[in-house]
Amino acid sequence: METPSSPTRLLLVDDEPDLREPLASYLERQGFAVKQAASAAQARAMIAEEVPELVLLDIMMPGEDGLSLCRHLTEAKAIPTIFLTARGEATDRIVGLEIGADDYVVKPFEPRELVARIRSVLRRSSRAAVAAQESVEEDFLFEGWRLDPLKRRLIAGDGAVVAISSVEFRLLLAFLEHPRQVLDRDRLLDMVQGREAHLFDRAVDNQVSRLRRKIEVDSRNPQLIQTVWGGGYMLAADVRRVPAGGA
């Protein structure tokens, strides 16, 4: 939770100053520390200097668009991201969630709703960070894979690091903490996205598909993350916790 002595750092990325500047002022009045970027290139430069705790990101911008920047933020930096966009169709929401966005707010929106979404995403991110800190001395091993929760690194058997988004990380962590247990979509939404986000079952399905493409030998015939018809999904693998960096 943000406090006067240590406000939560937000980066607002939008090429429309008429929206960006009043919104930044409103968020600052709510206690956040807000920096503004008018383009993806400017945002990258600012993030290189200081990593924000959450990014508010418009999709349609000149030059590099928000979808491309989101991939970089969620996979390379693991920064929670909320899309702000006029695109309200379900397919566009799914695309944004598939590439790792944590939430999606359609313009025009009530600023109070956005603040609620920001705090919801920050709570989920904080819970994941606490879970990682609690297992700071342990990594998860499963079927030749290793997940380092503290560094949020997924490591293949040959030592290659596979980039995963913040949402994919939370999804995989949920499966690893509940191996061989059926997790239905509602429970996965609670654990990974949070019901406050008002997402839908299809979003979970797409995130599972993305995760399968990264850890399955054949994602079209998944053996690790299995579909339980009428029930949800299950990690069909034994999981060991080992000292961080150990065998």
Image: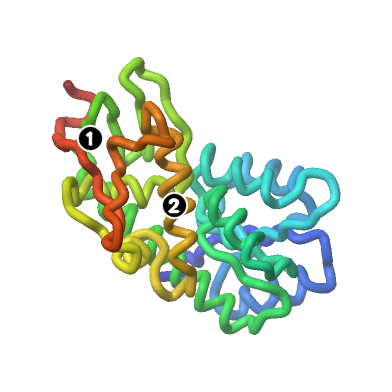
Q: Is residue 36 visible?
A: no
The residue sitting at 36% across, 18% down in the picture is: 159
Nearest the camera: 189 or 32? 189
Nearest the camera: 149 or 230? 230
The residue sitting at 62% across, 40% down in the picture is: 48
**Residue for badge 1:** 139
197 relative to 45 in the view: left or right: left
Q: Earlier in the sequence, mark 2 or mark 1?
A: 1
Q: Percent x, y for residue 224?
A: 28, 37
Would you call the spot at circle 2 few (<14 residues within 10 Å), some (14-19), or many (20 or more)?
A: many
**Residue for badge 2:** 167
187 relative to 198 in the view: left or right: left
Mark 2 vs mark 1: give the one in front: 2
Quarter residue 28 falls in: bottom right
| Image quarter in which the N terminus is found | bottom left
The residue sitting at 45% across, 35% down in the picture is: 213
Q: Secondary structure at mark 1?
A: strand
The residue sitting at 34% across, 37% down in the picture is: 222
